[in-house]
């Protein structure tokens, strides 16, 4: 699971860099991969919160579907690139890193 999270983090960074560089074609090529990867790991992420070691933060599981919906909505709106890059980099990427660190610290196997 850690490898999948690392790959998703790197993909999110690349996608965001394309937005920051105004390389819209690059973004259009990279974004579907980010969403596909997120869809692939989302069930595992949500299920991990049912582990007893995650009981105190189990409500955090609700964040992930809401975050995905926000990102897809911002991308589909086609307008605010700053809001989309913020959602991808400062929210999704940052929370993936925090989530991975939490799994490692709590020794949760996914």
Image: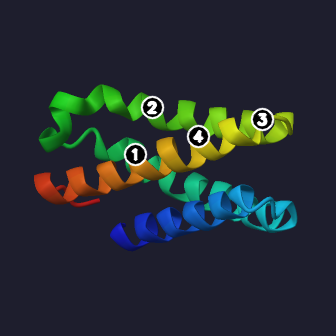
Q: What SS does tag 4 mark?
A: helix
Instruction: Report the mark closest to the observer, 4 or 3.
Output: 3
Circles 4 and 1, Cβ within 8 Å, touching? The answer is: no
Find residue 45 and report its horizontal and vertical position in percent.
39, 48
Q: Is residue 59 above or below residue 32?
A: above
Label placed on residue 80: 3
Which residue does the numbered mark 1 point to in the structure image?
95
Which residue does the numbered mark 2 point to in the structure image?
63
Which residue does the numbered mark 4 point to in the structure image?
87
Circles 1 and 2, Cβ within 8 Å, touching? The answer is: yes
Q: What SS does tag 3 mark?
A: loop
| Quadrant of the rendered image containing residue 53 | top left
Circles 3 and 1, Cβ within 8 Å, touching? The answer is: no
Q: CA distance from mark 4 to mark 1?
A: 10 Å
Q: CA distance from mark 4 to mark 2?
A: 13 Å
Q: Is residue 84 left or right of residue 96?
A: right
Q: Is residue 33 above or below residue 54?
A: below
Q: Is residue 7 above or below residue 13?
A: below
Q: CA distance from mark 4 to mark 3?
A: 11 Å
Disc 4 or 1, which lies upstream in sequence? 4
Q: Quadrant of the C terminus?
A: bottom left
Q: CA distance from mark 3 to mark 1?
A: 21 Å
Find residue 33 and report its horizontal and vertical position in percent.
69, 64
Q: CA distance from mark 2 to mark 3?
A: 22 Å
């Amino acid at each position: 699971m850690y490898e999948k999270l690392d790959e998703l983090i790197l993909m999110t960074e690349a996608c965001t860099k394309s937005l920051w560089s105004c390389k819209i074609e690059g973004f259009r090529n990279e974004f579907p991969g980010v969403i596909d990867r997120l869809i692939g790991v989302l069930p595992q992420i949500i299920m991990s919160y049912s582990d007893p070691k995650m009981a105190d933060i189990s409500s955090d599981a609700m964040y992930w579907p809401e975050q995905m919906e926000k990102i897809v909505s911002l991308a589909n709106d086609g307008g605010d690139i700053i809001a989309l890059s913020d959602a991808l980099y400062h929210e999704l990427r940052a929370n993936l890193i925090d989530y991975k660190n939490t799994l490692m610290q709590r020794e949760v196997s996914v």
